[in-house]
Image: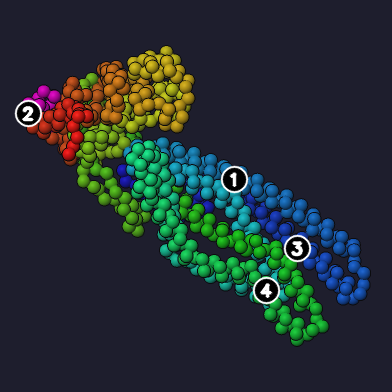
Amino acid sequence: MVIRLKSLGKKGISRLLEISGEKKRILIFSVFLAAVSTIIQIIPYIASYKIISLYIDSFQNSVPVDTDAVFSWGITAVVSVLVSMLFNGGSFVLSHFAAFRIIFNLRLRLAKHLATLPLGYFTRVSTGEIHKSIHDNVDLIELFISHKIPDLVMTLSGAVVVFGLYIYADWRLGLICILVYVISLLIQFRIYGDDGVKEEIKGYFRALEDINATSMEFARGIPVLKMFSMSARSFASLKKSVLAYRNFALRFARRGSRDFIIFTILVNFFIFFIYPVVIFINASNPDDYGIVLTALFFTVLSNAILPSLMNIMSISNVIMTINEGVERIDAIFAVKPLPVPANPEKPRNYAVEFDNVFFSYHDDLPDNGSGEKNTERRHCVVNGVSFRVEQGKSLAVIGRSGSGKSSILSLVARFYDADSGSVKIGGMDVRNMSESCLMDSLSIVLQKTFMFEGTIRENIVAGRSGATDEEVLNAARLARCDDIIAKYGLDYYLGGGGNNLSGGEKQRINIARAILKNAPILLLDEVSSALDAENELLLNQALTELKKNKTIIMVAHKLNSVIDADEIIMIDDGRILARGTHESLLRDSEAYRNLWDMYVSADKWRFNAGEREQ
C-alpha cells in the first residue's frame, strides 16, 4: 500500500470547506453579521466622546449643557449596544451552525473513507494518530469556524473603521497610530515568516500524535508496570514523547517571547505615541483646544479596538494550526483504497492458492517535491511462496516469530496486495473479487480479540446481521459460550473492549461470531496461544465445530494444535522451508524435527520447588 499525498492548491479554510462538502453561504452571512456588529459597537464610543465634548464646550463657553443632545447621544449609545448584541448573536448562532455542519460532514466523510481503506492501513498507523485527526483536529476546526473566523472579521472590520475615523479626524495622528500597529505586527510576525515555523507546527502535531499513541499504550501497560514495580518513568516511549513535547514548547516559547513582549507593549500603548505630537502642536498654539479634543477622540475610540488588536495574535496562531490540521486530515483522504475491479468475479469454489507470491511492507519517505511520497520497499516478508489448499482441507503455517506467517493470512484477506504473483480463491485473483464477495467468503479469528461496545448479542450478531435469537444461541452453544450466556445473558452490556470478560471468554464470543457468519474459508491466527488450559480446551472444542466443512489456514505456535492438519508448511524468512503432514515432516525435515523436539521439551518442563539455581 503506497500513500500518496497530493500537492493541493487550496489550503486552510478554503480546503476545509471543500473536503467537508459544505457551502460558504452560511459562513459568509455569519461573517457579514459579525462585521456589522463590530461597526455598530464603535457607536457608543463615539457617543461617549460627543457627550464629553458637550460638557467641555459648556465649561469653556460658560453656557448650560445641552441636555437634549446628551440624552440623544445616550439613547443612541444604548440602542447601538442592543442592536450590536442582536447582530453578534445572529453571527454566533450562524457560525456555530456552520461549524457543526462542517465537522459533522467532515467526521462522516473521514469515517466513510477510513471504512474503505485496507485493514493493513490500520496496522501501520497508530490509533493515536487516527484519533487525533478525527477528534482533536476536527474539534480545533470547530473552534476556529465558530469563534476565530468571526473574531478575525470583527478585528479587521473594527481596525479598518477606527483607523479610517482616525485619518478623517486628523491624518497626522491617524498615520502615527497605524504606523505603530504595523510595526508591532511586523515585529511579531517575523517569526512566522521563517520557514522553520512550519516545521515547528508539524513538530507540534507529531508530538501530540505521539503522546496520544503512547498514552494509550501506557494505559494498557499499567498492569505490567505495577507487577514489576516500575514507575511511569520506566515507560520509555511515553517519557520520550512527553519530553519531546516539552522541548518543543520551551523552544518555541523562547523563540517568540521577546517579539511577543514588544508586540504587546506597542499595541497596548499605541495611543500614547500621538501625545508628543499633540503637545508639540498645542505648544505652538496654546489657545487652540481642537487638537486636545482630537486627542481625546483618539483616546476614547482606542478602547473600542484594543481587545481586537491583541486578538489578532491568537487568531494567527490558530490559523497556522488549522492549516496543518487540514493537511493532516487531507493526508488521510490521500490514502487510496485498494483498487476495485470494474467487473468483479466470483470464485468457482473455495480453494485457496498462492502462486509465487512476493510481498513486503513499504516505508514512507519525505516528499521528493513531485507531489507524491517516495516509497522504499523493505526485505520481502513473503518471498516466492506457492501452495494450494483444496476446498474443505486445512493448512497449518508454522515458524519463528517474524518469519511471515501472519502476512500470509493478511494477503488472503487482502489487508494488502501482493507485490507480485497472485493470491487466488476458487481460481480467481482476490484483486478481481469485490470486497463484499471476498469478506463473505472469509471468517477471521485473530489472537487479539475485538469486542464492540454493546451487548453480547450485538457482538455475536456482528457476524451476520438479521440473525434470529435461536441462531445466535446456537452459535453461542457451538462456541462453548453456554457458561457465559448462563452467567450474564445475551443482553449483558459489555464496556469498551469487553474488559469485564476474560481473554478466553472474549475469544469464544469471537468464535461464536465466526460460527454465525458460517463463511466457507476460515483464517485462524494464534487463537489459543495466550489461554489457560481450561479455556484452551473449550476453545479447541469450539474450533472443532467452526472448522467443519471449511477451507482452513491457521497460524500456530503450539505444534500440538496443527498435527492433524492436512498439510503443514514451515516458514522461515518469508520462504517455505518444509511442507508435508506431521508424520512426513518428522521423517524428512530436520528443521521440523528440531522444532518439534523443542516444543516437546518445553511442554515437559516442570517447576521443581526443591531446587534452586546456584
Q: Helix or strand or loop: what does disc 4 sit on?
A: helix
Instruction: Determine which residue is flagged by label 2.
Output: 588
Q: Is residue 107 above or below residue 277?
A: above
The span from disc 4 to disc 3 (Cα, nearest Å) is 18 Å
Front label number (2 vs 3): 2
Q: Position of residue 67 (x, y in %)?
A: 90, 63
**Residue range (magenta):** 578-589
Q: Helix or strand or loop: what does disc 2 sit on?
A: helix
Q: Is residue 613 left or right of residue 463?
A: left
Dot 4 or dot 2, earlier in sequence:
4
Q: What kind of residue is marked 4?
A: Phe
Q: Is residue 70 left or right of residue 556?
A: right
Q: Helix or strand or loop: what does disc 1 sit on?
A: helix
Q: Identify which residue is drawn at 19% across, 29% down.
A: 610
Q: Is residue 115 left or right of residue 351?
A: right
The label number, if any, that marks residue 272 in the structure image: 4
The label number, if any, that marks residue 98 in the structure image: 1
Instruction: Determine which residue is flagged by label 3.
Output: 45
Q: Are marks 2 and 3 in contact (CB under 8 Å)?
A: no
Residue 430 can be seen in this image? no
Q: What kind of residue is marked 1?
A: Ala
Dot 3 or dot 1, earlier in sequence:
3
Quarter of the image for the N terminus: give it.
Answer: top left
Dot 2 or dot 1, earlier in sequence:
1
